[in-house]
Image (cartoon, grey):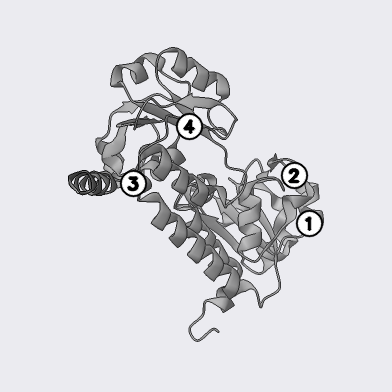
Amino acid sequence: MHRLFFALVGALVLAACGPAAPGSVTDDLGRTVALGGTPESVMSLAPNITELVATAAGVDRLAGVGMSDDFPAGVAQRPRVQTLPLDLEGIVALAPSLAIGSDDVNTADTADGLEALGIPAYLFRFDEVADVPRALRTLDTLLAVSGGAPAAADFERRVAAVQDAVSPFSSPRVLLLVGSETLYAFGRDSYASELVRLAGGDNLTDAFEGASSVPSDEVVLEMAPEVIIVLSGPDFDPASLLRDHPTFFNLPAIVNGRVYGMDPDLVSRPGPRLVEGLERLARLLHPEAFAAGAA
């Protein structure tokens, strides 16, 4: 009877402590990462990772962040280290239990270099929008926390709501650009291209293989985009696109005043705010779907 009592008490104590982190895990690059217990502090190697960890585990779990990490607001109080290129000495000085990076910013060699210095390093890969909620749930396991799962569920609910809202409408031809001068765009293999499709648009640069492309002015003229979205700062002037590319004067997007600027962090960072980027993109492409009284 006493043994049963103490066994029940022990089970309740363990449950109250939350899930335990596994001893070792395999990251998205197929690397085996030995954790050696629950990581108490995390060095973020990329801005989107900072946002993901803060969402799942709280800002205080971050031992350090990169120099350009600016969200959420609490990261301003965390120690900063150069992450591109990587300041190994600075990271070691912070003594994090685990470093977490993103393969679009960090390489396996970078992670292996940290591990050679005694810091386990886990790398995520973001090829599609669904990788964001997956990463949030993975962080729950890695860090033995429970904040990632509800955030992931909310992310997925909002994605589904956008799809439902835009599904009755035809898809406009969309050109999504990073800045207006070089015409850097996303190819068909990028999560940003998928974001356009989820928002109810036809991403014109899906014609290009890979994750990125740089179409010429002539190619853009042939594409005849109906909507142009430029990932730029808050002061973006739609007229600047025509100044940089005078031959665009007759494009449908120019003629109909459908050139818009968007916060690049809402699209270029595969993190919790990516769904906010999706919602804003959908409202730009389909204002009729979100008008008062729309079904």
Q: Residue at x 56, y 23 (%)?
A: 108
Location of residue 99 (image quadrant): top left
Mark in front: 4 vs 2: 4
Residue picked out by circle 1: 223
Write the residue at 36% across / 20% down: 91
* Discs 2/3, front: 3
* Residue kind at label 4, given as amino acid type: Gly
SS for dot 3 = loop
Find the residue positioned furthest to the left.
2
Q: How many marks?
A: 4
Alpha carbon of mark 3 to alpha carbon of mark 1: how far? 38 Å
Check contact, mark 4 vs mark 1: CB within 8 A. no
Label 2, secondary structure: give it: loop
Residue matched to label 2: 215
Residue 101 disc label? 4
Q: Residues within 10 Å of mark 4 (few under 14, many from 20)?
A: many
Does residue 228 show up?
A: no
